[in-house]
Image (tube, grey):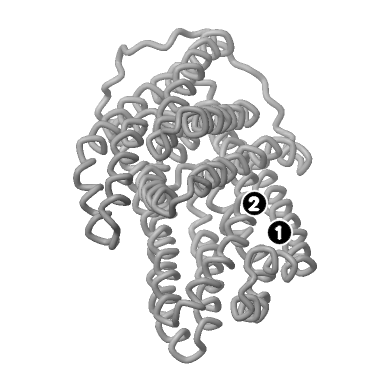
């Protein structure tokens, strides 16, 4: 087995350089959605846009719920990388591939249930429902490939090759844009074309990068991936527990954002609308700050694999400081340009007025959120997923209870106050559990 030497001097500059490719990859994802929306929004009938919007939202929520395949892969691969156990890295990839395909097949079989779920919860015309059925029927076939992409991204983050993980995401996004545009604009396939573009781009990306990864492992690690000794109950159980903890944590996080929509709707359509607008600012900030968390996942796992406490603490301190400093820049940007951006997004005066009144929350949340985003990356790299799950359970339960009372007495400002405390509580609970990571050294 070949042992490779990697620097244990992790500066803020190195973390930043590792994060830069992820910035661009993160921006490619919403850009693809914008293109799909534009394609459907210019077909002359609302039903095409409505069908695509609902169908993609549902499929994205389903696929995103299995994001544990990326996060679980990062922590295990990074720690094995630190130990120079390359053969086990390849077996971890193959085991997760099997899990991804199994989950994908189950979701494909559940396609009728997904369609009926949409039909039950949304009041739609028959034409729109038929278009949704068409989209889901094609898009659901891409799930196995999209889940494998999560694993491949996790692998490259785990070995600190963020340029390759980003290249993978960007490749899929570009293929998706090109193919969807061709199918819609040239072949007039409307919703079917958008779904087909995603399906084909997913499998092309998987084939290209699976072959590349196979050769990468042979060349860099000097081993040949095999299926021998792949089914080991103890290792499969470890994978299952790590993935299950992250799955629960992700569901709780998703529910908390749905709760914001629900509470906003109780205040009226105007507040529901501005909360939707304001959340885009929070999501945009997260795209930037998550890049640091993603790059740190591999670094933290590597430090634990090496059992180098000094390197670990240096990584933690530098990444948190860098994330916080970037969040301050984002807040300053929002402070200066918030009104101008709102005026571009909406021309409805009441929505503009209410948005201005809530600007303070958009400005103060990014620095507060930078800590929980970065701690998430640290805990994922350390495979300390049970603590992440427990911290999220405490935070979400507190948020729901608090939001009911603050919204009742302080309206929408009370909702945003409770959201800010929820974000802070995520950081506090993870900081409390941080001592458990130190026990690994």
Q: Can residue 79 be seen in this view?
A: no
Task: For mark 2, give the secondary structure.
Answer: helix
Query: In the image shown, does 31 or 194 lie closer to the viewer?
Result: 194
Q: Is residue 38 visible?
A: yes
Where residue 86 appears, as percent x and y from the top left, is 49, 18
Q: What residue occupies the far bottom of the structure in this picture?
A: 409
Query: In the image shown, does 39 or 139 lie closer to the viewer?
Result: 39
Report, in whole angstroms, how far the alpha carbon at label 2 lies from the one at label 1.
7 Å
User: Which mark, by number, is residue 105?
Assistant: none
- Total marks shown come to 2
> Is residue 282 shown left or right of residue 439?
right
Would you identify the image quadrant in which residue 294 lies? Answer: top right
| Point 51% across, 71% down: residue | 273
User: Which mark, by number, is residue 327?
Assistant: 1
Q: Earlier in the sequence, mark 2 or mark 1?
A: 2
- Crowd rating for badge 2 (residues with CA inside 10 Å; few <14, some 14–19, many 20+): many
Task: For mark 1, give the secondary structure.
Answer: helix
Q: For mark 2, what is the residue?
A: 289
> Is residue 209 shown left or right of residue 371?
left
| Point 28% across, 35% down: residue | 103
- Crowd rating for badge 1 (residues with CA inside 10 Å; few <14, some 14–19, many 20+): many
Q: Is residue 78 above or below residue 278?
A: above
Where residue 256 appears, as percent x and y from the top left, is 42, 65
Q: What residue occupies the far front of the structure in this picture?
A: 44
Q: Is residue 378 above or below residue 9?
A: below
Quarter of the image for the C terminus: give it: top right
> Is residue 179 shown left or right of residue 331?
left
Where residue 68 appears, as percent x and y from the top left, is 41, 42
Where residue 6 appears, as percent x and y from the top left, is 68, 24
> Is residue 301 shown left or right of residue 330?
left
Q: In this view, does 406 lie above or below 297?
A: below
Q: Are marks 2 and 1 in contact (CB under 8 Å)?
A: yes
């Amino acid at each position: 087995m070949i042992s490779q030497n990697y620097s244990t001097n992790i500066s803020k500059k190195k973390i930043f350089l590792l994060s830069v490719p992820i910035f661009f990859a993160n921006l490619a994802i919403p850009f693809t959605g914008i293109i799909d929306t534009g394609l459907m929004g210019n077909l002359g009938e609302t039903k095409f846009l409505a069908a695509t919007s609902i169908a993609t939202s549902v499929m994205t929520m389903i696929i995103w719920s299995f994001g544990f395949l990326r996060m679980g892969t990062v922590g295990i691969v990074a720690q094995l990388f630190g130990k120079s156990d390359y053969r086990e890295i390849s077996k971890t990839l193959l085991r997760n591939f099997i899990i991804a395909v199994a989950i994908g097949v189950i979701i494909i079989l559940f396609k009728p249930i997904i369609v009926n779920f949409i039909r039950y919860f949304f009041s739609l015309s028959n034409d729109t429902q038929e278009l949704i059925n068409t989209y889901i029927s094609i898009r659901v076939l891409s799930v196995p490939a999209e889940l494998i992409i999560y694993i491949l991204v996790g692998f490259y983050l785990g070995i600190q090759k963020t340029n390759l993980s980003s290249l993978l995401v960007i490749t899929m996004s570009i293929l998706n844009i090109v193919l969807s545009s061709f199918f819609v604009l040239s072949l007039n396939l409307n919703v079917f074309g958008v779904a087909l573009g995603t399906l084909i781009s997913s499998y092309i990306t998987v084939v290209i990068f699976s072959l590349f990864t196979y050769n990468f492992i042979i060349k860099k690690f000097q081993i040949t991936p095999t299926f021998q000794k792949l089914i080991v109950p103890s290792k499969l159980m470890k994978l299952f527990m790590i993935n299950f903890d992250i799955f629960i944590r992700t569901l709780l996080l998703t529910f908390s954002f749905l709760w914001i929509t629900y509470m906003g709707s109780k205040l009226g359509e105007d507040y529901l609308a501005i909360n939707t607008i304001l959340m885009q600012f929070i999501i945009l900030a997260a795209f930037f700050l998550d890049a640091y968390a993603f790059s740190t996942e591999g670094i933290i796992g590597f430090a634990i694999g090496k059992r180098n406490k000094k390197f670990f603490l240096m990584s933690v301190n530098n990444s948190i400081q860098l994330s916080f400093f970037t969040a301050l820049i984002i807040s300053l940007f929002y402070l200066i340009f918030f009104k101008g951006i709102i005026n571009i997004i909406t021309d409805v005066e009441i929505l503009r007025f209410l948005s201005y009144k809530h600007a303070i929350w958009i400005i103060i949340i990014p620095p507060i959120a930078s800590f929980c985003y970065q701690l998430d990356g640290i805990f994922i790299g350390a495979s300390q997923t049970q603590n992440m799950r427990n911290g999220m359970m405490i935070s979400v339960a507190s948020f729901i209870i608090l939001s009911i009372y603050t919204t009742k007495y302080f309206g929408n400002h009370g909702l945003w106050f409770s959201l800010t405390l929820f974000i802070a509580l995520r950081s506090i609970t993870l900081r409390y559990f941080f001592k458990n990571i130190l026990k690994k050294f």
